[in-house]
């Protein structure tokens, strides 16, 4: 049981006092694939009750004929009956006062229509009775500390302070199964179909669990993006969160859908959301393990300056390549360090980082190795030491065994990570020695070591950064009311795309529109355009003309007076000819904006994460150039600045080649206001401002397109309850 | 000994009949770090002669007092005397008729000036006596087949038909030291400083060695790029070549320089060269091993369609992500395959790729596993099978052991690679079983498996592609003569940058220059510009003005007549004011080119690979946009087309958004002619044509800059003899 005083939602799952197993066949007694076997192997100390009318006894457990016979001390049921039996079984559990259940059985929302209907019945029982459910379609849980598991396959025990949450039993089975190491976590939970207990519940449990220092998460789909981000941001302040997002590709997403019955979010949006939420994203199962182990072992790293000591010069060169790929730097050794170790090297070798220590080590490892390693660990210009050595286990190679020194010296320098890469005939044996005090880690590859150091540096920078308060554009109730009115009317009119309506909304929110006027017919023309200065630009306004240029619906550089009238007539005639039957609402006449760098500001509404604001290179080739930064709204001014800085076009906006730079704050304002509009008006599915001209004098918007949500209002497309 | 009838350069190194060891101390007898020990351990069957005046006997060897005492059967000396003694020792060997030597000693060009001078003396002895040398600063060689090695550290024996060549003893020590596996090659050669025997020599040896099917190469610097490319292209037709280029980063290159005394080439140029030469490039020591083992095991793969069978749905999702990252596809299973396996799965599971086989396997592995695997291996729409399984070694898990099936069924289907990823408690043990027949490979990570399959697919496509003959623009002797004259004069004039001279050379080669005239003074103006149509563009011509725009040296959209005269005066005055003392040769007056997409065509001369042609997005922001493709000259028309296709701007040139596409063949011609100029005129160090306007009507050049080689002629900056 945990030492918390207030009971938490997951306590009956994580540390149950007694459990009932329902659906265990007689053949499962003594079987290697049986929760009964694994519970006994784990040494679970609570009461085990097996519900099976045709069984008489089982070792270490009490057999009951029916759920009604299990004692009231049981606070968790493990259900693995055939899928059609699950709702009735769950109902019985709830009726008997069992407050929690893990449903192992698969074939629900992960499978076919019948399964989805069955899951619907489970949902109804949960809602009606208040019983809490993990699964269905899950292996459930393993907790080394309470020695409890619902897994039907053997799991390793580990006390590494890592809490894992997974959407697949595969990851939940533990990294020891991938790496031949210890489990890699002390608690793991497989969410399965997550009909009740979900990702956020588990994250919040780990947040308050004193045994957990690092949280790792395998996610195939994030259901409630905003809730995830809020939880991740809050939890990240005390415990780093590492995420492996599986199902990244279109093909992968198909498999995800059939695997968990959930819809995977778009990769770029989820990548942005993870970064924004301060999550460390891993690229593979191995990296998930490597990152969480590194964070649990070292906590963080003070800077990015790495010293390399290597038995091989060739290995050191590969290490430098790996550090560079990870964005780290070679430390410059202090004069004191150089002086301390110089005597070990022949005269003709320059003593500098990386240190090729083969010659001193071949001469006398016991003298030179600790001398060099200590010098590096005490050098104020070194943030971490990367150690490349060989691990020959033959007795004849004893004099080249550095493992004890690495273990002891790293343990004596807790502030500086010591990361290792080994070559030799007994890498595993040497690794056990080196990692015995949990003060150094041996990585399978140099890139693994470098990437782990890189996230330790990020974690270190975060801990030392003063939490700058985010700033936002002021709320604008008046604009919101105007926009709501326009959107209401547009919906009533059955509009799907907004043009002049979008211009009006942007005007209301104070975005820097190039001066414009909507002109319904020729008679309106002089009056409406009186305040506009030529050269002008004309754009057709029709709900039936989406690609204006292609339909003769755009004219640029038009003069005023007679020229304007002629252009108006030409355009309406041309569009009528090219798009027969198109409804023509009129023409928008607009001043030509002062030229500048073309950027794009937009928004797409993601099914999981909601409005995602986009900034990047604009113009007709925006999609091809594909230079975009993404942020989930609301976007603060600080985040907007960071978005701009991420793009390639930022270097042009900064004023390349002696040109004056663009007004970045004007763009920040556009981005923040688009964010504001997106949050305030969920009816808008997509916003496209392209091009926005960015120049030294500010930003200028000349075109806008809003797409309204299908069916009017924004609907959450996740599959949760 | 090899079975070749004609003796080859490396035969005395690779399979020496008898050897002399010079520089072995008495303490090395029985030492674990001793060539004498490793030779005995390998079971070398040739004669071993130790030259040491103070030693009397050594097991398995004959001790001689001096080199003059060793018998004439000795055809290789292994020298590890102190560095200052090396030249005299080598001289003695040569004098005694020993034809080959491996110099282990370090501290030569890899170290300081004294070392470099000593290496110079070695070079002189080689040139004078004809003795052939491997090293210095090398571990030398290991050959499992002849049981010979010069390594002073134990090496594993292996008969995998891979030949390795390395520039560091670290890699040469064998992958078994990195992976706890067998060596990973049957022959390896460490080049060290390569004062004589070089990379090409070793590649050519492996090319003719029937025991070698795949060549792997660890290179920190390529000295002679063109020779390497020619060898790689030729050898690649019969034996795939895998390269790990170390020292990729600026920092890494510093370490490379100090490590082997060689200058590393620029990464992007060498990447282009490797690709062009058909080399498979590995990113890490582990990938070098993975690629060569995969090519040696499977040869190639017919297509890109992969079937996945997995014990875990979650694992299958991760596998799909890995396949996607590697550019592979999920195979669509044939109706026959689906029909064959459908009965194994519950009704609610859709039977399609990836196949989550846990339910059938849990029921009866011996029935379902071979059924599924055979169905996939015989499906014509499947090019390879990826198998994810668990490897529990406990007897109780015997019924889940798929390893024997994977070994046997893959061996029965030699045409289709079977790649595996395992989770379990005895991955190594299962791997030994699965790989016993060398018909399947277990990869440590899914991405390793996917990336290996991707190169197998490339190799397969290569084998099936008809070798299309390359086409080239016709030679142009007249243009070459004109250009040679211009360059000769420019050098004589001490010019570093060429402007009008470059225009003249480009005109001579028939590049599509916008019509232009060089005008020396006002008096010339009317006559010289009579044939030019306004609007015109003016550019200052001065050897002292490099950045013309910044100095008032560019005017656009100028009219003819009076307007032209005024612009001419303004420009010469402005430049004289802004760059006081600048020599003014006059002004270039040019027709404004028809607008189009701005591209850049250029050339940089790489110290190792020679002229490297560049194509990509042009304009003032070309460097920022960084959208370039590189090829080593000469560039064929086919390669030029491929270059264009690699860039982002290609999508714009293709005619995005309904616009007419640019004339690609006109750009191909520009690229090929720049290549031609680069090859014909090594005095040109750099060519910069930016912008080149590309439109439907063709290409149009409006600006050009040539940089002449420092000191006039192009000099090879490698550090070879």
Image (tube, coloured by chain):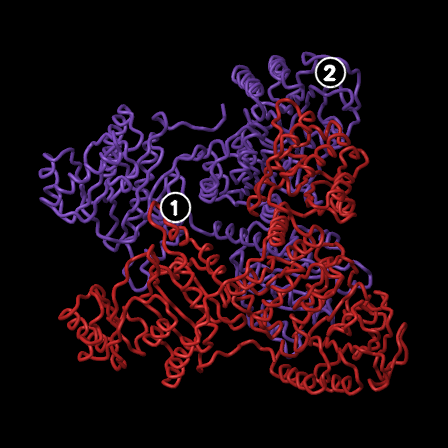
Chain colours: A red, B purple
Q: Nearer the viewer, residue B420 or A21?
A: A21
Q: Where is residue B220 in the image (x, y as percent from the top left)?
A: 55, 35
| Mark 1 and mark 2: Cα distance apart in space | 61 Å
Say whether disc 1 or disc 2 marks the residue closer to the N-terminus.
2
Q: Quadrant of residue A467?
A: bottom right
Q: Residues within 10 Å of mark 1 (few under 14, many from 20)?
A: few
Q: Nearer the viewer, residue B373 or A332?
A: A332
Q: Which mark is residue B52?
A: 2
Residue B267 in the image: state x and y as whole percent. 48, 41
Q: Residue under circle 1?
A: B623
Residue A719: x percent and y percent? 58, 77
In the rendered structure, the residue with mark 1 lies on which chain?
A: B
A206 vs B426, nearest the viewer: A206
**Is B713 displayed left or right of A421 in the figure?**
left
Q: Can residue A87 be seen in this view?
A: yes
Q: In the rendered picture of this protein, how many numbered marks are placed on residues? A: 2
| Secondary structure of the residue carrying numbered label 1 | helix
Q: Residue at x 65, y 75 (%)?
A: A193
């Amino acid at each position: 049981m945990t030492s918390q005083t207030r009971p938490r939602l997951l306590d009956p799952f994580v540390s149950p006092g007694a459990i009932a197993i329902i659906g265990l066949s007689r053949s499962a007694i003594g079987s290697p694939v049986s929760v009964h076997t694994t519970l006994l192997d784990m040494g679970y100390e609570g009461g085990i009750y097996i519900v099976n009318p045709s069984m008489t006894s089982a070792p270490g457990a009490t057999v009951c004929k029916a759920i009604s016979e299990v004692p009231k001390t049981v606070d968790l049921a493990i259900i693995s009956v055939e899928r059609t039996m699950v709702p009735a079984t769950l109902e019985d559990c709830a009726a008997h006062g069992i407050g929690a259940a893990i449903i192992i059985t698969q074939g629900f929302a992960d499978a076919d229509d019948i399964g989805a209907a069955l899951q619907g019945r489970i949902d109804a029982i949960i809602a009606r009775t208040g019983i809490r459910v993990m699964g269905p379609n899950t292996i459930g849980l393993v907790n080394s500390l309470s020695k409890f598991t619902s897994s039907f396959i053997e799991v390793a025990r580990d006390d590494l302070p890592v809490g894992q949450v997974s959407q697949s039993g595969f990851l939940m089975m533990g990294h020891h199964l991938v790496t031949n190491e210890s489990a890699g976590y002390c608690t793991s939970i497989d969410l399965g179909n997550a009909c009740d207990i979900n990702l956020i519940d588990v994250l919040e449990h780990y947040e308050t669990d004193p045994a957990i220092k690092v949280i790792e998460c395998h996610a195939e789909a994030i259901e409630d993006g905003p809730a995830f981000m809020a939880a991740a941001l809050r939890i990240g302040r005390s415990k780093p969160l590492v995420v492996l997002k599986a199902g990244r590709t279109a093909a992968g997403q198909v498999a995800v859908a059939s695997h968990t019955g959930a819809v995977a979010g778009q990769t770029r949006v989820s990548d942005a959301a993870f970064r924004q939420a301060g999550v460390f994203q891993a690229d593979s199962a191995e990296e998930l393990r490597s990152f969480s182990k590194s964070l649990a072992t070292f906590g963080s790293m003070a800077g990015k300056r790495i010293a390399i000591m290597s038995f091989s010069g060739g290995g050191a060169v590969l290490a430098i390549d790996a550090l560079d790929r990870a964005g780290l730097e070679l430390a410059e050794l202090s004069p004191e360090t150089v002086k301390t170790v110089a005597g070990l090297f022949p005269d003709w070798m320059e003593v500098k980082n990386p240190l090729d220590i083969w010659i001193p080590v071949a001469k006398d490892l016991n003298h030179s190795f600790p001398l060099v390693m200590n010098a590096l660990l005490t050098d104020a210009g070194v943030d971490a030491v990367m150690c490349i050595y060989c691990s020959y286990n033959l007795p004849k190679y004893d004099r080249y065994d550095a493992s004890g020194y690495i273990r002891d010296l790293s343990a004596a320098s807790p502030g500086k990570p010591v990361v290792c890469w080994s070559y030799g005939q007994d890498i595993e044996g040497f690794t056990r020695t080196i990692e015995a005090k949990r003060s150094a880690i041996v990585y399978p590859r140099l890139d693994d070591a470098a990437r782990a150091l890189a996230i330790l540096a990020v974690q270190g920078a975060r801990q030392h950064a003063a939490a700058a308060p985010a700033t936002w554009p002021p709320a604008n109730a008046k604009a919101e009311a105007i926009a709501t009115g326009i959107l209401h009317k547009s919906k009533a009119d059955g509009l799907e795309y907004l043009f002049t309506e979008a211009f009006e909304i942007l005007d209301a929110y104070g975005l820097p529109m190039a001066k414009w006027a909507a002109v319904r017919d020729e008679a309106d023309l002089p009056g409406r355009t009186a305040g506009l200065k030529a050269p002008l630009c004309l754009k057709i306004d029709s709900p039936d003309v989406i690609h204006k240029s292609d339909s003769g619906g755009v004219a640029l550089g038009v003069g005023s007076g007679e020229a304007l009238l002629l252009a108006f007539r030409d355009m309406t005639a041309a569009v009528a000819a090219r798009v027969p039957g198109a409804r023509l609402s009129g023409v928008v006449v607009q001043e030509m904006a002062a030229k500048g760098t073309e950027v794009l500001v937009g928004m797409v509404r993601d099914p999981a994460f909601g409005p995602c604001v986009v900034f990047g290179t604009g113009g007709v080739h925006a999609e091809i150039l594909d230079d975009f930064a993404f942020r989930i709204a609301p976007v603060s001014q600080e985040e907007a600045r960071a978005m701009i800085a991420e793009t390639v076009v930022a270097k042009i906006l900064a004023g390349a080649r002696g040109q004056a730079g663009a007004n970045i704050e004007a763009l920040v304002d556009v981005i923040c206001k688009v964010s504001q509009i997106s949050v305030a008006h969920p009816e808008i599915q997509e916003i496209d401002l392209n091009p926005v001209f960015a120049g030294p004098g500010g930003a200028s918007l000349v075109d806008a397109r809003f797409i309204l949500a299908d069916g009017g209002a924004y609907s959450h497309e996740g599959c949760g309850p």
